[in-house]
Image: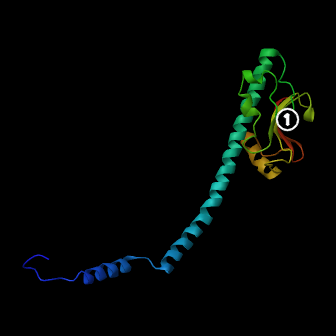
Amino acid sequence: MREGHPARSVRPRARQRTRRAAACAFTLVEILIVVAILGILAAIVVPQFASATASAGQSAFATNVRAYAQANALYYQDFGEYFEDSGTGNAPVMFGEYFDVADFESETPIGGEWDFENNGVGGYEAAVGVVFTGAGTTQDDAFMEQVDRIFDDGDLANGGFREIEDNVRYYQIVSR
């Protein structure tokens, strides 16, 4: 202790700090209310993100289909024939001259596998699209009609983008 100062007890100050801290703290009820409000907000926002993700996948898919169809048309200009039909999920020979083969051989942005058709499916000379084999992510007609709206009229029975086989094959027609 210093000289000239009366002795003070430390305890009353400690009690004052504890009382002030308790007065500033949140009660359990207040915390539960905040958690409930955050839960409600999350329930509102999360579906909107899921919708945005689906829309982004559809746009990316449409962009890729157009690019692959243009590559097929360029190949026709260079060689007088379309890319060969190499089987679902496999890039045709010479495809690597136009695009990255690994991108084509991976899953599409909407699920399923990429596919080129040549003189085969649906009676079209050339087409590029997606095949849903049932493994992994698959899409239904309602989802693919939204994709078709990006291309043309939203009707999978006609236009440049079509359903070739029920709920399995959807293609952009390159040449009829």
Secondary structure under the numbered disc 1 in the rendered image: loop
Q: Dividing the picture into quarters, in which one does residue 40 lie?
A: bottom right
Is 85 drawn above or below residue 157 in the view shown?
above
Tell me which amino acid carries mark 1.
Thr
Is 106 drawn above or below residue 54 in the view shown?
above
Q: Nearer the viewer, residue 11 or 41?
A: 11
Residue at image coords 93%, 32%: 123
Left of 70 or right of it: where is 16?
left
- Tell me residue 167's x, y (percent): 87, 48
- Tell me residue 96's x, y (percent): 74, 23
State the residue lying farthest toward the left: 4
Residue at image coords 29%, 81%: 16
Residue at image coords 37%, 77%: 24
Left of 90 or right of it: where is 45?
left
**Local crowd size for mark 1, using a 10 Å CA cut-off: few (<14), some (14–19), many (≥20):** some
Q: Dividing the picture into quarters, in which one does residue 19 lie?
A: bottom left
Q: Dividing the picture into quarters, in which one does residue 43 lie?
A: bottom right
Left of 51 or right of it: where is 128?
right
Is 20 drawn above or below residue 155 in the view shown?
below
- Tell me residue 78's x, y (percent): 77, 15
Is 168 drawn above or below residue 174 in the view shown?
below
In this picture the colour scheme is rainbow
Query: Which image quarter is the C terminus in?
Result: top right
Q: Is residue 109 among the parts visible in the rendering?
A: yes
- Tell me residue 98's x, y (percent): 72, 23
Q: Which residue is mark 1?
A: 88
Q: Nearer the viewer, residue 104 or 117?
A: 104
Query: Which image quarter is the N terminus in?
Result: bottom left
Q: Is residue 172 among the parts visible in the rendering?
A: no
Question: Total number of numbered labels?
Answer: 1
Q: Nearer the viewer, residue 81 or 97?
A: 97
Residue at image coords 29%, 79%: 14
